[in-house]
Amino acid sequence: MARKHLSVAFPLLAALLAGPALAQAPDLADGRRIYDQACAACHGPTGRPDPSSPVLAGLETPPADLSDPLFNSREPANDWELVVGHGGHAMGLSAQMPAQREALSAEEIRNVVAYVKTLADTSDYPPGEFNYFLPIRTKKAFPEDEIVWKGRYTPLDGAPDVMRNVIEIEKRVGHRGMVVLELIHEDDGFDSEVTKVEGGYKHVFGWNRERQSILSGAVILAVPTDGDESKEIIPYLAYARMFGDDWVFQSSARAITPLDDAGDGQLELAGALHYRWTQWPRNVFPGIEVVAEAPYDHFGSDVQWSAIPQLRFGLTKGGHVALNLGVEVGLSDQPWDYRVHAVLLWDFADGSFFKGWR
């Protein structure tokens, strides 16, 4: 029986470690031909719509500016292929964008999307292919324009249960950067108050298209609302990589260091694996995270482990509003047995909160 299990496990592990297979390069010349015939009338010959065009005068929603490098780089090519093939409505966008899957083959759709991606100089912008799912505790490497609510419920034996809420506002700056502001609220049954404000900056160091990986770093300053508590400086690294066509691995390392007594800090290591079984964002995607926390002064001896099985629900057609639910199970001597997590995100760069629900 063990030999049978190994015969299944080894090929699976080898497939994960091998990374994505290299696909044949798209035909950009064919993509340009298709673009000139089917797309340029609305989006303009260079990707920038002409406001004086009589075609645009009859449209309720202005076509997207494909020459804008930030817009062009935000989302993966696959999302664009879904829009071209199935129409804007299929992804919660304008119904004015017609479906082309009957007029164009899958290869032609891939070619025209690849050509459209060349209409802006996105060489210094992180590609949207690395815009992976937001885990529950693992930090994300890709910079975002999002508003996120994070809720955590912790039942305790012999003590009041604790509810923690975090409102996180993320805004992209420059080509690779993102600023972030967090408000942290806690309710322990006696006090219900904002306990901490955090702010900082995240920067993408680099990415590798062949390995489908991305590396970022951030520095966060945490300021408690109680003047008796110490401020904290929290640098972290975040790394993500796609394995094959379906598996997304993300990891982060945070050093939480009080400014009053640096030796009283702790290191947090987290890793998440999600199974992206379909390219359509409006679906349910399973995942699991593992978190290890250790204090500086007892590093290696007092590590606390926990695991978080979770489900991500794409709520809108384009997935710009999503919910992640998980249960964190303590694997060490934590004062809690489990925690319930909920993470609701809204990518406001992709439209209003209410767009694309039906």
Image (spheres, grey):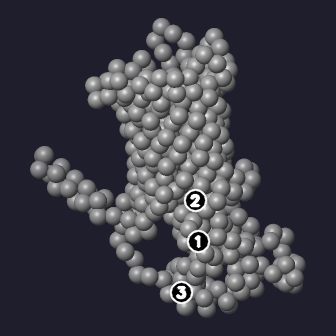
**Residue wearing tag 1:** 122
Q: For the residues labelled 2 and 1, say whether their Cβ atoms are less than 8 Å apart.
A: no
Element type where label 1 sits in the image? loop
Question: Which comes sooner in the sequence, label 3 or label 2?
Answer: 3
Q: Residue at x 60, y 42 (%)?
A: 200
Quadrant of residue 230 within the rendered picture: top right
Q: For the residues labelled 3 and 1, say whether their Cβ atoms are less than 8 Å apart.
A: no
**Residue wearing tag 3:** 28
Disc 2 residue type?
Answer: Arg
Quadrant of residue 350 within the rendered picture: bottom right
Tell us which disc is closer to us: 3 or 1: 1
Category of crowding for the residue at label 2, using alpha-carbon neighbours closer than 10 angstroms: few (below 14), some (14–19), many (at least 20): some
Real-space CA distance between mark 3 and mark 2, rounded to the nearest whole angstrom: 27 Å
Question: Which comes sooner in the sequence, label 3 or label 1?
Answer: 3
Q: Which residue is drawn at 61% across and 85% down?
A: 103
Residue 54 in the figure: left or right of residue 242: right
**Residue wearing tag 2:** 176
Element type where label 3 sits in the image? helix
Tell us which disc is closer to us: 3 or 2: 2
Disc 1 residue type?
Answer: Thr
Residue 351 in the figure: left or right of residue 295: right
| Residue 258 image point, x, y percent | 50, 27
Residue 214 can be seen, yes or no:
yes
